[in-house]
Image (cartoon, grey):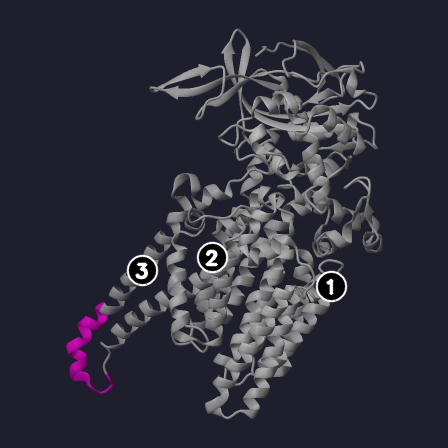
């Protein structure tokens, strides 16, 4: 199956040229299929996807416009105002630098924006070839082809590298997997002449991968464990030891050359793991040379025990460079409850068994066969496949984002499992055919079996076709079933800027219009306060200064913004002014229903700040029971009357609907199991006087219409720096009807009378 095994496509099986044509054809199919699957979001428009890609695009553009020397000195004063952000030390500079140079080489006449939108698709498609090379090294050509095809389709991989996903994962995975391939290939060489150059290149690429995506630190885990396991399963480890030394030295040197990860990689857990694994190999090689064969295993176990004790001592004593909470959380999943900011991020949610079955389906069965065969063969290659499979699934159990690693482990094992099934099937078919052949010279027996022998190739061909159809059918099932969570449906993800970062497969221009309005109708030096989710959009698309963004590098600042929104309106106003904010942006998602007589009623809680309020409360350090009802979602009257966010949400609860005896009943107060219905109520209307702390100067298009359906309300409030808090009471949210002037997405101002109902 693995080391030393024969591929299905060896000379004598069929023509050697056909073998190469088949391999090229399968790889081309994997590349094209991966390209198509990753390009699925183009149906919603040609945008950068999610939030981080907007910063990464902006940073890459800075290198293209100003050069690398300027980038190394860049203190970005448009983010994390007023102190700014040291970009090289706080971002994945490897991604920015590599992308900038790739654009200079391959960008041709395209814009940098278009280039970065398409780059993740190209990198993800190329990685199908890298995964082929890696699995081919572990288990042969057939296993590599299976894994390449699986990599092209797997949802968790596609979702972290589709059109517009100009983030760290596509480039980081490309470099990380290529580094692992070079390492395994180097270890399997019998000559240092070829092994060392591969190890050096692999180490350099792993370091560059770590500078491109912090998640590449994961690869230090299976590599270091493999270094420790190798002396137990490989008799001669001389070349492997030299390879490990070269790989580790150049990995550390390459990662340490960048401001990030820099020293945190060398003296952090990833670097310590690599160094420790390499030192163990050196010690094991020395023991192998001085020990007799009978005592070799015992001595290695003593050495391993000593390393385990030292490793535990380092971890318990904390004798390593501080590591990001998220990476520690991947190793110790029990840390997640200690940090509400980490827990508030959707991609940090803990995946469930349903997520694994949805993402991998039939692959889990094939991966199980791969695990069984790895235990059966116990070669160095099979042990590495087992290590990467188990560790990948383990780290993915903490964050949904890390399902990319579970995908890699399962794809490797499933490819090997599929190969083993195919090999066994073909061997049985081949042995059946050969059993009917006769030796030359025995013409009498040959005549007896001639008729049966003539029929055998046809039967074998039918069996082979049937087997192929069965495998294709099994792999096709998760592509289309179940309907709402099939692999195809999971690839159908609108860019966040198009659906407002919600779960709807829906396109809206609300955010693009809002950011264009900010850019055109606010002073250039304006400072915008908002929840950190929207910071990158504000700085990149609106070209305005933000107070916090998706880097979350200052958690105290984020807690301050949470307090601004959840504290009493006058206190929240003071916090906004202390933060030097000129405008406050609030994002509310609702659904509008016609209520008769031209009026509307609304349901909230669909992905905007109204859905994040519980995280505002927790991160700000407030008591949830004060602001939320028993269900933990529905706001209390205290929330509506005594928080700045309650005042900035332009709705007021009107009824609470519940089901009683099979029919819907409206009641004036909340009861367990009921849900709120709202009417529109702008509490801080556009007002040129100085008697209110904020003035609503802009509302996005879907809020300004009366059409039933989804509302993606992006609201811009101007801060009144002349407001004196004691001039008004911070009291009731029950406001009279207002005539409001809301600037639309063009430069004109629309005067629109809005009637609101009192509670």
- Assess whether residue 444 is covered by the magenta stretch: yes
Q: Which residue is mark 1?
A: 263
- Assess whether residue 322 is covered by the magenta stretch: no
Q: Main secondary structure of the magenta part?
A: helix
- Which numbered disc, 3 or 1, marks the residue closer to the eye? 1
Image coordinates of residue 101 in percent, x first then y, are: 74, 55
Residue drawn at point x = 50 percent, y = 56 percent:
406
**Region rendered in magenta:** 439-455
Q: Which mark is residue 467?
A: 3
Which quadrant, please, contains the N terminus? Answer: bottom left
Residue drawn at point x = 42 percent, y = 21 percent:
658
Q: Looking at the picture, does residue 390 appear above or below residue 110?
A: below
Mark 1 closeness class: few <14, some 14–19, many ≥20 residues within 10 Å = some
- Which numbered disc, 2 or 1, marks the residue closer to the eye? 1
Image coordinates of residue 745 in percent, x first then y, are: 71, 23
Rounded to the nearest angstrom, the CA distance separating label 3 from label 1 is 53 Å
Label 1: state its secondary structure.
helix
Rounded to the nearest angstrom, the CA distance separating label 2 from label 1 is 38 Å
Label 2: state its secondary structure.
helix
Rounded to the nearest angstrom, the CA distance separating label 3 from label 2 is 17 Å
Compare residues 8 and 535 and report the one nearer the observer: 535
Q: Which mark is residue 149?
A: 2
One can see residue 519 in this view: no
Residue drawn at point x = 48 percent, y = 85 percent:
298
């Amino acid at each position: 199956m693995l080391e030393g095994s024969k591929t299905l496509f060896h000379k004598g099986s069929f023509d050697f040229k056909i073998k190469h044509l088949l391999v090229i054809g399968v790889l081309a199919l994997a590349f094209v299929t991966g390209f198509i699957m990753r390009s699925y979001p183009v149906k919603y428009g040609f945008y950068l996807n999610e939030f981080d890609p907007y910063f990464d695009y902006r940073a890459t553009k800075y290198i293209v416009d100003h050069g690398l020397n300027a980038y190394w000195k860049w203190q970005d004063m448009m983010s994390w105002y007023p102190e700014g952000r040291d970009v090289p030390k706080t971002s994945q500079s490897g991604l920015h630098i590599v992308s900038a140079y790739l654009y200079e080489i391959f960008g041709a006449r395209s814009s940098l924006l278009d280039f970065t939108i398409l780059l993740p698709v190209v990198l993800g498609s190329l990685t199908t070839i890298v995964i082929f090379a890696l699995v081919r090294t572990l288990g042969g050509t057939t296993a590599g082809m299976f894994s390449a095809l699986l990599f092209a389709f797997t949802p968790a991989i596609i979702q972290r590298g589709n059109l517009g996903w100009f983030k760290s994962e596509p480039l980081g995975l490309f470099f990380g997997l290529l580094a692992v391939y070079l390492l395994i290939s180097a270890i399997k060489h019998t000559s240092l002449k070829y092994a060392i150059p591969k190890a050096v290149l692999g180490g350099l690429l792993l370091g560059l991968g770590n500078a491109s995506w912090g998640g590449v630190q994961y690869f230090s885990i299976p590599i270091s464990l493999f270094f420790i396991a190798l002396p137990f399963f490989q008799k001669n480890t001389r070349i492997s030891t030299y390879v490990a030394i070269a790989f580790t030295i150049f990995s550390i040197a390459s990662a340490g050359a960048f401001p990030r990860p820099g020293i945190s990689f060398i003296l952090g857990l990833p670097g310590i793991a690599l160094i420790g694994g390499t030192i163990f190999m050196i010690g094991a090689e020395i023991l192998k040379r001085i020990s007799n064969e009978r005592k070799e295993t015992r001595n290695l176990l003593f050495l391993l025990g000593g390393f385990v004790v030292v490793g535990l001592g380092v971890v318990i004593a904390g004798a390593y460079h501080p590591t990001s909470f998220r990476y520690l959380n991947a190793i110790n999943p029990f840390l997640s409850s200690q940090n509400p900011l980490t827990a508030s991020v959707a991609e940090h949610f803990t995946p469930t068994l349903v997520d694994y079955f949805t993402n991998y389906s039939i692959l889990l069965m094939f991966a199980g066969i791969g695990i069984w065969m790895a235990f059966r063969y116990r070669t160095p290659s099979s042990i590495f496949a087992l290590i990467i499979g188990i560790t990948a699934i383990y780290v993915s159990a903490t964050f949904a984002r890390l399902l990319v690693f579970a995908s890699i482990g399962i794809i490797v094992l499933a490819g090997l499992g599929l190969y083993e099934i195919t090999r066994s099937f073909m061997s049985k078919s081949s042995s059946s055919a050969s059993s009917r052949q006769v030796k030359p010279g025995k013409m009498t027996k040959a005549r007896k079996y001639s008729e049966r022998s003539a029929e055998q190739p046809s039967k074998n061909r039918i069996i082979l076709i049937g087997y192929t159809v069965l495998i294709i059918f099994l792999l096709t099932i998760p592509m289309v079933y179940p309907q709402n969570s099939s692999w195809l449906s999971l690839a159908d993800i609108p860019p966040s800027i198009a659906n407002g970062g919600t779960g709807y497969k829906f396109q809206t221009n609300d955010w693009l219009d809002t950011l264009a309005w900010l850019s055109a109708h606010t002073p250039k030096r304006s400072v915008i306060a908002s929840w950190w989710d929207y910071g990158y959009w504000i700085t990149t698309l609106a070209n305005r200064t933000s107070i916090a963004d998706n880097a979350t590098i200052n958690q105290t600042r984020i807690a301050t913004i949470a307090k601004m929104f959840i504290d009493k309106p006058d206190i929240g106003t003071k916090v906004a002014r202390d933060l030097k904010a000129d405008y406050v942006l609030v994002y509310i998602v609702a659904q509008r229903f016609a209520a008769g007589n031209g009026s509307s009623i609304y349901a909230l809680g669909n992905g905007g700040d109204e859905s994040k309020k519980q995280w505002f409360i927790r991160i700000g350090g407030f008591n949830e029971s004060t602001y939320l009802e028993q269900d933990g979602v529905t706001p209390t009257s205290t929330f509506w009357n005594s928080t700045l966010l309650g005042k900035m949400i332009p709705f007021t609860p009107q009824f609470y609907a519940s089901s009683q005896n099979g029919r819907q009943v409206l009641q004036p107060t909340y009861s367990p199991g009921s849900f709120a219905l709202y009417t529109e109520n702008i509490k801080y209307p556009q007002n040129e006087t100085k008697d209110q702390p904020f003035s609503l100067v802009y509302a996005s298009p879907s809020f300004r219409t009366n059409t039933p359906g989804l509302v993606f309300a992006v609201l811009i409030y101007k801060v009144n720096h002349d407001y004196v808090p004691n001039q008004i009471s911070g009291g009731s949210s029950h406001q009279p009807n207002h005539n409001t002037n809301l600037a639309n997405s063009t430069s004109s101002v629309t005067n629109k009378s809005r009637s609101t109902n009192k509670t």
